[in-house]
């Protein structure tokens, strides 16, 4: 006997992500999910981002790692609420972990929520966290063909941030090829180039965040 | 690396279906996996076998329907199946195309042995 099922394998994750999205909408929380390989600079980008935000900005961070509270400690310096999620071996964050981490936070206080995923370009792409946009980071010490090797995450991300551009003179990374490869995999993808060391490109990055936040708010407000 | 968790979700769904049909053994499950889903079919099959060993689901078949990426051309409107990284329109050559399918990760059907007569 064959029973037609037709449902997502990650049905439960989808359900929880849907609940999160609804809560974000209810409280006007704008949520971004940052994904990259380990060491591409997600934490450094968030450090620079938090430093640059006015102190009265209502921003918070959830940061995922397999072990250690190191990233949360780094990010706490800016004075905004930060919570570490240690997955204990799991290679990605899922909607249940986010739900649990947010349980005692007042979402009414948060305008922007950054989620720093576990360093991995494959598994995080399968798990919806209720975010408004996924952002993929690629650093110039990696291969410029990474978008071709990991098309899933580059297709699902609205923006690709190319980080560590201050190192371009010292590495064989072809930035034009990286841009081409990203757009081959995801035509129309937004691209930004930054250095968290020299702070080059950070203004454009902040402008992208605020523009995207306004777009979400506009959609929420309706016509 | 997360294929084990995915395999467990599939097995859980089979168990659930089995209970719904008075304990009839689930013998086969059909899943649809898009090439952008981030799931490797071989790793999933391995996880499925490893996790079902020594359980009532041992020996059940995992049938994988692997789907290529589908794009729609914004210029001429045609839809085409393609490899992950070749997104230009084969009809009109436009680079302006959008992804419309290829990240599937779905359970399509479950087959069960006929339940023993009560």
Image (cartoon, coloured by chain):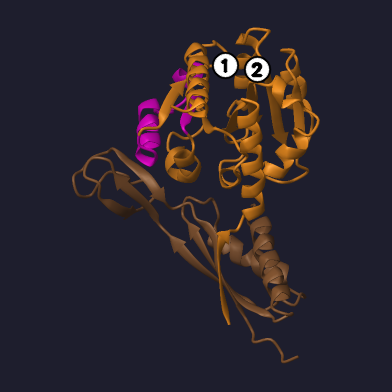
Chain colours: A orange, B brown
At a point 57% along the width and 60% down the height, the residue shown is A7
Whether pointer 1 and pointer 2 mark residues with C-beta atoms closer than 8 Å, the reply is yes
Residue A61 position in % (x across, y down): 69, 25
Q: Is residue A4 left or right of residue B4?
A: left
Q: Nearer the viewer, mark 1 or mark 2?
A: 2
- Name of the residue lying farthest toward the bottom: B117
Residue A190 position in % (x across, y down): 42, 28
Residue A148, compared with residue A81, is above or below; it is below
Query: Is residue A180 among what the camera can see?
Result: yes
**What SS does tag 2 mark?**
helix
Host chain of mark 1: A
Taking depth in this image into account, of A58 and A39 the one nearest to the observer is: A58
Residue that label 1 marks: A196
Residue A39 position in % (x across, y down): 62, 30
Quadrant of the rendering where the C terminus of chain B is positioned: bottom right
Residue that label 2 marks: A47
């Amino acid at each position: 006997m064959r029973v037609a099922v037709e449902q997502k394998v990650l049905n439960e994750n989808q359900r929880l992500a849907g609940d999160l999205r609804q809560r974000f909408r209810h409280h006007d929380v704008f949520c971004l999910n940052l994904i990259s390989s380990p060491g591409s600079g997600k934490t450094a980008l968030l450090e620079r981002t938090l430093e640059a935000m006015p102190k009265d900005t209502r921003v918070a961070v959830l940061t995922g790692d397999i072990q250690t509270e190191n990233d949360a400690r780094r990010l706490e310096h800016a004075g905004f609420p930060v919570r570490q999620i240690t997955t204990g071996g799991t290679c990605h964050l899922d909607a249940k972990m986010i739900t649990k981490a947010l349980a005692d936070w007042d979402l009414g206080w948060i305008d922007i929520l950054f989620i720093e995923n576990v360093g991995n370009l494959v598994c995080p792409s399968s798990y919806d966290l209720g975010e408004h946009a996924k952002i993929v980071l690629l650093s110039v010490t990696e291969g410029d063909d990474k978008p071709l090797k990991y098309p899933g995450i580059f297709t699902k991300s609205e923006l690709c941030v190319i980080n560590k551009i201050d190192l371009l003179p010292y590495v064989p990374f072809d930035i034009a090829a990286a841009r081409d490869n990203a757009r081959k995999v995801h035509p129309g993808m937004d691209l930004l180039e930054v250095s968290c060391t020299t702070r080059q490109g950070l203004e454009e990055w902040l402008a992208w965040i605020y523009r995207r936040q306004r777009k979400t708010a506009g959609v929420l407000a309706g016509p | 690396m997360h294929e084990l968790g995915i395999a467990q979700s599939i097995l859980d769904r089979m168990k659930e279906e089995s209970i719904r049909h008075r304990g009839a053994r689930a013998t086969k499950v059909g899943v649809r996996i898009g090439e952008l889903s981030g799931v490797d079919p071989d790793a999933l099959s391995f996880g499925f076998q490893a996790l079902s060993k020594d359980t009532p689901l041992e020996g059940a078949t995992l049938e994988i329907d692997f789907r290529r990426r589908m794009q729609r051309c914004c210029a001429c409107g045609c839809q085409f199946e393609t490899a992950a990284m070749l997104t230009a329109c084969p009809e009109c050559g436009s680079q302006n195309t959008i992804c419309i399918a290829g990240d599937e990760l779905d359970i399509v059907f479950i087959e069960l042995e006929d339940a023993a007569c009560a």
